[in-house]
Image (tube, grey):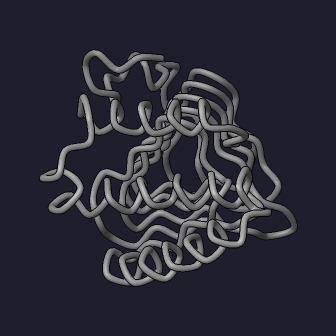
Amino acid sequence: MISDKASYKYYLKRDLQAHELDKLSFYNYCWMDCVRFQYRLRKIEYLNNVRRNNLFCRIYQVYLELLNHRLALKLGFSIPKNVFGPGLCLVHYGTIVVSPKAIVGENCRIHPSTSIGFYNGAPTIGNNVYIGPGAKLFGQITIGDNVTIGANAVVNRNVPNNVTVGGIPAKIISAKSSLDNDVFPDGFIL
């Protein structure tokens, strides 16, 4: 969770690295909607967590939330603040629904048509997790570190570290981790 200015900058840096960008340029901000959404989301988290007592910052936060809500409607995102760790990569637009009760670690890569839902509890997802297109995760489950979740998988049970799961309901289909499957870009810092 973003707790100060340094952690805010760290989150932004890791998110840009996840998108294989060195820095946020005017072009990237204007034409890459997913990057713009994430940048504003991190700014909203910073203002909400750190600068909440400043009236001007609260007004600015509401303004950014309105802008991001409009962009989220265009992109199909329903992503609340303070859920994802640093290194989030929203690959491209499409329906992504995340419960505000979910907890997601560092370096999560999410594809469209994905749902991380609440059903008698919300998922806790570890670090370096790749979530394929159409995956559904729900319930009070724990997803380990370095996990690859295949396309259209329905995950409703705990998943151990360093495996690949797929199917309905999801089962372990390989002992390869997300790091072995090359699902993260080259040069990505873990």
Write down the quadrant of residue 48 in the picture. Answer: bottom right
**Residue 20 located left or right of residue 96:** left
Q: Tell me where residue 86 appears, x and y as whole percent.
A: 54, 36
Along the line of sight, which residue is nearer the eye, 185 or 38?
A: 38
Q: Nearer the viewer, residue 29 or 188?
A: 29
> For the point 44% across and 74% down, which residue is it?
68
164, 100: nearer the viewer:
100
For image coordinates 73% across by 50% down, the residue present is 50
The N terminus lies in quadrant? top right
Asked whether, in this view, residue 164 is left or right of residue 113, the answer is right
Q: Compared with residue 140, is residue 94 higher up or lower down, i.e. above or below?
A: below
Horizontal and vertical percent for residue 78? 52, 73
Q: Is residue 171 above or below residue 119?
A: above
Give the image quarter of residue 121: bottom right
Q: Nearer the viewer, residue 58 or 30?
A: 58
Q: Residue at x 20, y 58 (%)?
A: 32
Where residue 150 sits: x, y (%)?
A: 43, 45
| Residue visible at 57% across and 39% down in the picture | 8
Furthest residue in direction right, as rendered: 120
188 horizontally vs 88: left or right:
left
Left or right for 92, reference 124: left
Total labels drawn: 0
Residue 182 in the image: x percent, y percent? 31, 22
